[in-house]
Image (tube, rainbow, N blue to C red):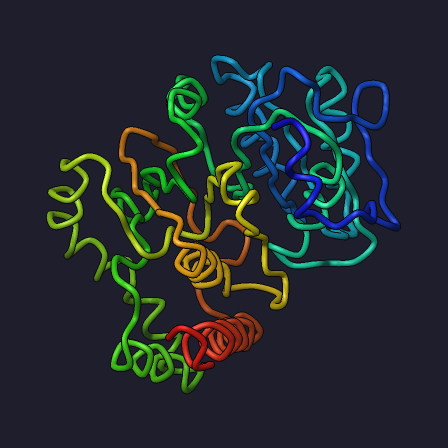
């Protein structure tokens, strides 16, 4: 069991990287059961809040935390390096290029999962996540990783006040895919849709609250701010698709699980908070719109409109 990750990850360690912590390069210890990877880009204060909340978790010594700095070009790396100096299970990996969300996360995983580990869970998440529940790790480790592909926690949005999961409840059919393309057909339509999104979500709050009260349930796609991958996901050949810079993660993870026949389960007993849009900004910029459109076209074209199992 200890070395199965080695079959799925790249065998090439990250190049052009600096790994920092108390005493230098860190390896996942034999006692670590959870690997957490988060990505920073010019948001050191946000990342330090994330680190502080993670360090308060009961059982934090049973996890290994990797922070990837995506070539911020400011003082982010220095501030983070100073903050983690007292931890022996936290490291900073600095990239000389901005690899995007899954690109940076996969870069970190390629370094760690190419080595034998005893990990049961791999968390990939935004740096604007806060662990409000100090028992989060204990609740996660109470789950049998053999029974899940991906776990989707309750992600309480600071904008709307309710759970952002499930991101997509059912696999999108043709009409829903057309709606996605329409919403991103022009910058102005996409801007309006993003501006209206919190109000639409608030209007659906009761529905989400009733759904959350039902306990664990299967869903199609988890919200992209927080993915919890089981070891079974990687055993079966799952991987992080870094073919797009941003915004393709939910569908790529959902389709990977769908094709591998692995369940994606929403578990409202696992709870985190999300300071929405701390990294990308609240209002949609033109560059953000282009990235969203590129991500959608990539995900739909590769997974849902390619004719492969659609």
Residue 119 spot, x, y in % from top left: 59, 28
Q: In which quarter of the image is residue 2?
A: top right
Residue drawn at (53%, 29%) of the image = 120
Vertical order, 297 against 69 (above or below): below
Residue drawn at (50%, 64%) of the image = 247
Residue in the foreground of this view, choosing between 192 and 228? 228
Residue in the foreground of this view, choosing between 106 and 208? 106
Residue 24 spot, x, y in % from top left: 85, 25
Vertical order, 215 against 101 (above or below): above
Residue 91 spot, x, y in % from top left: 73, 29
Left or right relative to 195: residue 120: right
Furthest residue to the right? 16
Residue in the foreground of this view, choosing between 91 and 151? 151
Quarter of the rendering occupied by the N terminus: top right
Left or right relative to 307: residue 23: right
Quarter of the rendering occupied by the C terminus: bottom left
């Amino acid at each position: 069991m200890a070395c199965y990750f080695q079959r799925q990850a790249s065998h090439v360690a990250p190049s052009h990287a600096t790994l920092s912590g108390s005493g230098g390069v860190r390896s996942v210890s034999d006692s670590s059961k959870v690997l957490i990877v988060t990505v920073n880009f010019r948001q050191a204060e946000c990342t330090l809040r994330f680190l502080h909340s993670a360090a308060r978790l009961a059982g934090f010594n049973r996890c290994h935390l990797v922070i990837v700095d995506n070539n911020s070009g400011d003082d982010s790396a220095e501030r983070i390096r100073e903050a983690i100096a007292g931890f022996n299970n936290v490291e900073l990996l600095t990239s000389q290029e901005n690899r995007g969300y899954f690109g940076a996360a996969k870069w970190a995983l390629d370094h760690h999962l190419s080595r034998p580990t005893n990990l049961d869970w791999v968390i990939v998440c935004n740096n604007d996540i806060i662990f409000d529940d100090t028992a989060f790790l204990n609740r996660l480790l109470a789950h049998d990783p053999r029974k899940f592909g991906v776990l989707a926690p309750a992600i309480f949005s600071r904008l709307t006040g309710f759970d952002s999961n499930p991101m997509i409840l059912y696999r999108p059919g043709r009409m829903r895919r057309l709606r996605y393309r329409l919403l991103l057909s022009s910058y102005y339509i996409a801007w309006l849709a993003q501006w209206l999104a919190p109000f639409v979500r608030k209007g659906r709050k009761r529905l989400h609250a009733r759904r959350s009260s039902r306990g664990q349930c299967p869903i199609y796609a988890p919200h992209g701010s927080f993915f919890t991958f089981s070891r079974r996901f990687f055993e079966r050949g799952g991987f992080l698709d870094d073919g797009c810079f941003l915004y393709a993660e939910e569908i790529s993870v959902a389709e990977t699980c769908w094709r591998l026949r692995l369940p994606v389960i929403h578990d409202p007993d696992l709870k985190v908070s999300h300071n929405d849009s701390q990294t990308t900004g609240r209002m949609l910029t033109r560059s953000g719109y282009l990235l969203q459109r590129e991500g959608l076209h990539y995900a739909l074209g590769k997974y849902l409109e390619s004719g492969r199992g659609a």
